[in-house]
């Protein structure tokens, strides 16, 4: 997934708002929706594109699982008022990883295996990988997420 993480986060936020009222639900969903891709900053500027950015910890479900469990248990005990946005935040991260797994590859088996799993292979049909992705049919999923997010946004703001 290249372009649709922010609108996907928005859809998660709108969905959460249907079931609960908390001022931080949308912010948690938007941040969680795009946070894994902050590793691109490392990928491009620090590591010189040395390895696939989906190998960074923010893209690895096996890192998030214990963090999510410990955070939710801790909040449940000491700050239950923050549980709703925390749940939405981790849900948005999970959605990000699921969307990345459609065509991009996610290390679902880590720490048992470093292999990146994906549902569909996007062949390198064009000189630049971005072009290959945009012209592959899986990109229509991104457009659908954008359409859904814009629909929900206009519905909520008029
Ligand atoms: Zn990503």
Image (spheres, rainbow, N blue to C red):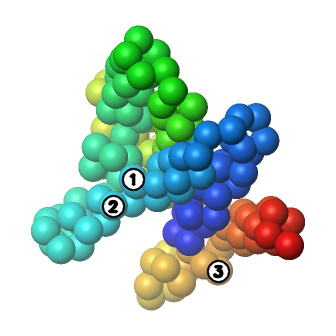
The answer to whether 94 is drawn above or below residue 145 in the figure is: above
Task: Using a 10 Å C-alpha cutoff, classify the residue at mark 3 as few (fewer than 14 neighbours), some (14 to 19) or many (20 or more).
Answer: some
Residue 122 visible here: no
Assess whether mark 1 and mark 2 are in contact (beta carbons under 8 angstroms): yes
CA separation, marks 2 and 1? 5 Å
Of callouts 1 and 3, which one flags the residue occurring earlier in the amino acid sequence? 1
Kindly tell me whether mark 1's CB lies below 8 Å from ligand 1. yes
Q: Quadrant of residue 72?
A: top left
Q: 53 or 70: which is nearer to us?
A: 70
Q: Which SS class for mark 1?
A: helix
Nearer mark to the viewer, of 2 and 3: 2
- Quarter holding the N terminus is bottom right
The answer to whether 50 is drawn above or below residue 17 in the figure is: below
Rendered location of residue 57, percent (x, y): 28, 43
Q: Which residue is mark 3?
A: 135
Rendered location of residue 70, percent (x, y): 35, 19
Rendered location of residue 97, percent (x, y): 50, 46
Q: Which residue is mark 2?
A: 38
CA separation, marks 1 and 3? 24 Å
Q: Which SS class for mark 2?
A: helix
Q: 89 or 84: which is nearer to us?
A: 84
**Residue 68 vs residue 156: left or right?**
left
Q: Which residue is mark 1?
A: 36
Q: Which SS class for mark 3?
A: loop
The answer to whether 64 is drawn above or below residue 44 in the figure is: above
């Amino acid at each position: 997934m290249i372009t649709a993480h922010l609108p996907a986060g928005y859809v998660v936020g709108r969905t959460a708002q249907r079931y609960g009222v908390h001022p931080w639900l949308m912010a948690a969903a938007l941040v969680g929706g795009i946070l894994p891709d902050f590793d691109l900053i490392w990928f491009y500027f620090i590591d010189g594109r040395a390895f696939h950015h989906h190998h960074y910890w923010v893209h690895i479900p096996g890192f998030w699982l214990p963090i999510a469990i410990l955070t939710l248990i801790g909040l449940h005990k000491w700050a239950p008022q923050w549980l709703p946005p925390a749940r939405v935040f981790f849900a948005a991260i999970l959605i990000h990883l699921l969307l990345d797994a459609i065509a991009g590859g996610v290390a679902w088996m880590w720490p048992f295996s470093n292999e990146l799993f994906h549902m569909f292979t996007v062949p390198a049909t064009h000189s630049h990988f971005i072009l290959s992705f945009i012209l592959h049919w899986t990109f229509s999923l991104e457009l659908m997420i954008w359409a859904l997010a814009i629909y929900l946004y206009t519905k909520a703001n008029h």
